[in-house]
Image: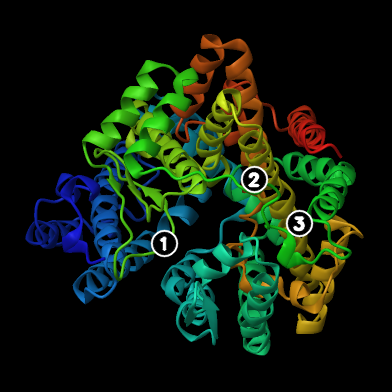
Amino acid sequence: MKRDQVKEKYKWNTSDLFATDEEWEQKLKEAEKLLDFAKYEGKLSDRDTLLKFFKANDEFGKLFERLEVYAHMRHDEDANVTKYGAFYSRIMSLYTKYATELSFYEPEMAALDEEYLNSLISDSRFADYDYDLKRIIARKPHVASREEERLVGMSGEILENFYDSFSAIDTLDLPLPEIEWNGEKTTLTHGLYGIILHSSDRAKREEAYNKYYGAYTSLINVLTSVYKGNVKKDVFLSRVYKFKTCLEQALFSEDVDRAVYDNLIAAVDEHLPSMHRYISDRKKILGYDKLYFYDIYAPLVKGVEVNYSYDEAYKLVIEGLAPLGKEYQQLLKRGYDERWIDVEETEGKRGGAYSTGCYGVHPYVLLNYQPTLNEVFTIAHEMGHSIHTWFSQNNQPFSKSQYKIFVAEVASTVNETLLLKYMLKNAEDVNLKKYLLNYYLDSIRATLHRQTMFAEFEDAAHNMAERDEPLTKEALCGIYAEIGKKYYGEDIEHDYNISCEWTRIPHFYRAFYVYKYATGITAAINIAKRILTEGEPAVKEYFNFLSGGCSTDPVSLLKLAGVDLSTKAPFEVAMAEFDETLKELEKLMNI
């Protein structure tokens, strides 16, 4: 389908950002004129000058954010329209200039007396910046020299090249072969691979699995080189900023205590017998002598047809999130009525789904909607992100409005969990109930167990690099295979293909990102449980979390919603949820 064939009500309304491309061009010129930060260098010890600097930085930031969001949204509508790709390149070049110009800021602030910085925190005029000032004090031991900061700022685009290289290989150069599907020969795309893996045709799953991984293993030398370079980049930056390890730097950047990471790894490892039992159950239900990784997504329940039009799906999401109250439901309705959402899959449109936004304008959601159950949950998920953004931006100043990545997956997963519980409660057909239980188990497995497994792999890879051990393809595949065997157990066949899975994971190019999915679903399970059992008081506390932006560290923000990840308790709740869901499925399946 071409974009001009889509009804207006199913297209996002970008005019709420800029009415025309000409207006974007004009505002870009204004942003370029705002790049006048050099005049503040050497003068930040004067509090009046520092306050002016903060205000000027906010002014630039608000405008830049709107320009960037418009450029990437318009580009994502249709990558064939080169105009918007050029828009995005121009805005990224502007950011590089901005980062270079501000290279004096961190070293100069770090050199300021701690007593002076604390006095600023106590000054009501700096209330919008108190958390930033606290983080400056914390960063004092990790600030590079003025020249080092300038060089890092100038090399920003170069340091991002490893991710860009992987993306180019994965999107453009991966030798994906043809496969016959639905009676036609077609290219085995990433999306089609996922569809086939979820199908009941085992022979076709095996064929797709071998062909798909064959494409990656044919390029394993270059993919190893690119990933090795990315890890070395992480080690380089951790040493520039005087951290003992890359993990320490990643946790510090999010203001997260190491205990949270350790609690996650320990809890998942301790409860792996439940994961192994699920794999064993899957093998029994499917009736296979041997279970392979291409069987891991095969449907356990047959004969369940769940087809919702977009309008039906959106209505179901609003109904399912009723426990969050009328205010939340009204925001969902606004998103639909005010065209926050780009719905249809069209030629040249970016695949997948995401939520984005900028200060002063409502958030936006990109979808490629298909009438499946998974897509219903995608609506709930992305609107969770968007309404989290809405709460943060409407309750915090610009300087505190961007919540950290650590908590970014919480609201989205709360929505998915509440919707699933609603559908389970209202499922009259026993097969649908089995289907939903299996869906929930696979969601937890993919988001909690699998992402924690990923986290263990990237920690091991970075530890090797920090010890100056060579990151060869044999070493990386060996690490991945060993961790995979621990996670999935003995009831599944561990072949060479799956030992190479690390080569296709884009999140590995954002080191120590994946564990946040696991902590996110852990927090979400706990929050949803509280909302369903305690009602309005729990909702109110949850809204306090949603409204927090980055006004304090993310672990403290989650405490506002009744979840303390610095303790083991929330992780035990999440593990128990998986175990209880598995028992319920086993009971219905007569296992």
CA distance separating discs 1 and 2: 42 Å
Task: Say if 30 sits above or below 362 in the image.
Answer: below
- Identify the element where label 3 is drawn: helix
Which quarter of the figure is the C terminus placed in?
top right
Q: Read off the residue under disc 2.
A: 443
Q: Read off the residue under disc 1.
A: 103
In the picture, the disc for residue 49 is none
**Going by the image, does 225 lie left or right of 310?**
right
Q: Read off the residue under disc 3.
A: 453
- Of 116 and 224, which appears nearest the observer? 224
**Amino acid type at image mark 3:** Met
- Residue 235, image x and y in percent? 67, 69
- Of 220 and 126, which appears nearest the observer? 220
In front of the other: label 2 or label 3?
Answer: 2
At 51% from the left and 47% from the top, the residue drawn is 374
- Of 20 and 533, which appears nearest the observer? 533
Could you tell which of marks 1 and 2 lies nearer the N-terminus? Answer: 1
At 84% from the left and 75% from the top, the residue drawn is 478
**Going by the image, does 259 lie left or right of 274?**
left
Whether label 1 touches label 2, CB < 8 Å = no
**Amino acid type at image mark 2:** Ser
Whether label 2 touches label 3, CB < 8 Å = no
Could you tell which of marks 3 and 1 lies nearer the N-terminus? Answer: 1
- Residue 472, image x and y in percent? 77, 84
- Residue 89, image x and y in percent? 29, 72
Q: Quadrant of residue 230?
A: bottom right
